[in-house]
Image (spheres, rainbow, N blue to C red):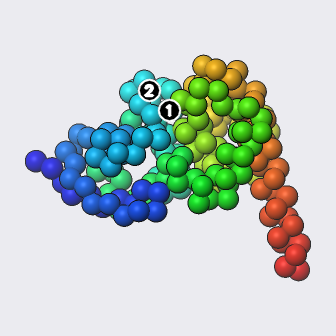
């Protein structure tokens, strides 16, 4: 027996029939054909499946689809509509913070969550925010540098905007 849930994904409203035990990652990939969030470990350890749900990073392999009923879900593909997401994508490119790209969608979503709360994170804070996201290619320093650069750019543009309004 399934349930209809209503969920906004990357700005598009969807009503989908889900079984109570269906995971959010399965609903996104199998029901909605959204393939940005990846299935990695299926146990919440790798972070490849991280999406933003109501503005906060969640591991979609550990979240039931029914928990997303009424929620706003943003995947890495939807980050292009968000200034933080665009800035992070640009910084990841600039700092060579992606190689195979498998972890990148989850890394970007986790970093957006961090930058929502903190536009001046130090290396330790960035590493803490991303600790649930594994990358086997980059060695992490490029990712930390990219997040730091994006935070600086966002902080500078905010300061400029606030200074321009005075």
Residue 16 coordinates in the image, percent (x, y): 25, 55
Task: Please name whichever residue, 80 or 160, is drawn nearer the observer in this view of the structure.
Answer: 80
Instruction: Residue at the far bottom: name it.
Output: 166
SS at circle 1: loop
- Residue at x-position 45% and y-position 34%: 38
Residue 79 in the figure: left or right of residue 42: right
Label 2, label 1: how many angstroms apart (C-alpha)?
Answer: 6 Å
Q: Mark 2 or mark 1: which comes first in sequence?
A: 2
Secondary structure beneath dot 2 equals: loop
Residue 142: % across, % down: 75, 30
Closest to the observer, 126 or 136: 136
Q: Which x, y percent locates residue 13?
A: 36, 64
Q: Residues within 10 Å of mark 2 (few under 14, many from 20)?
A: some
Indicate the quadrant containing the C terminus: top left, top right, bottom left or bottom right. Answer: bottom right
- Asked whether the viewer can see residue 48, the reply is yes
| Left or right: where 68 falls relative to 148 | left
Q: Which residue is mark 1?
A: 48
Residue pictured at 74% horizontal, 32% vertical: 96
Image: 67 above or below 92: below
Q: Quadrant of residue 72?
A: bottom left
Residue at 46 percent across and 39 percent down: it is 37
- Of residue 165 and residue 99, the one placed in the foreground of this image is 99
* Residue at 52% over, 49% down: 77
Question: Contact, CB < 8 Å: mark 2 with mark 1?
Answer: yes
The label shown at residue 92 is none
Q: Which residue is mark 2?
A: 40
């Amino acid at each position: 027996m399934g349930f209809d849930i209503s969920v906004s994904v990357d700005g598009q409203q969807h009503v989908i029939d889900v079984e109570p035990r269906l995971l959010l990652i399965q609903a996104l990939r199998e029901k909605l054909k959204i393939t940005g969030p990846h299935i990695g470990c299926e146990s919440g350890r790798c972070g490849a499946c991280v999406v933003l749900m109501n503005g906060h990073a969640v591991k979609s392999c550990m979240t039931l689809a029914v928990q997303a009923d009424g929620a706003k879900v943003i995947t890495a593909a939807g980050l292009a509509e968000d200034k933080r997401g665009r800035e992070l994508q640009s910084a990841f490119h600039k700092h060579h913070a992606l190689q195979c790209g498998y972890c990148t969608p989850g890394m970007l979503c986790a970093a957006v969550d961090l930058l929502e709360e903190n536009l001046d994170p130090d290396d330790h804070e960035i590493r803490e925010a991303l600790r649930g996201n594994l990358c086997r290619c980059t060695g992490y320093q490029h990712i930390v540098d990219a997040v730091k650069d994006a935070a600086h750019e966002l902080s500078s543009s905010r300061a400029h905007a606030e200074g321009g309004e005075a």
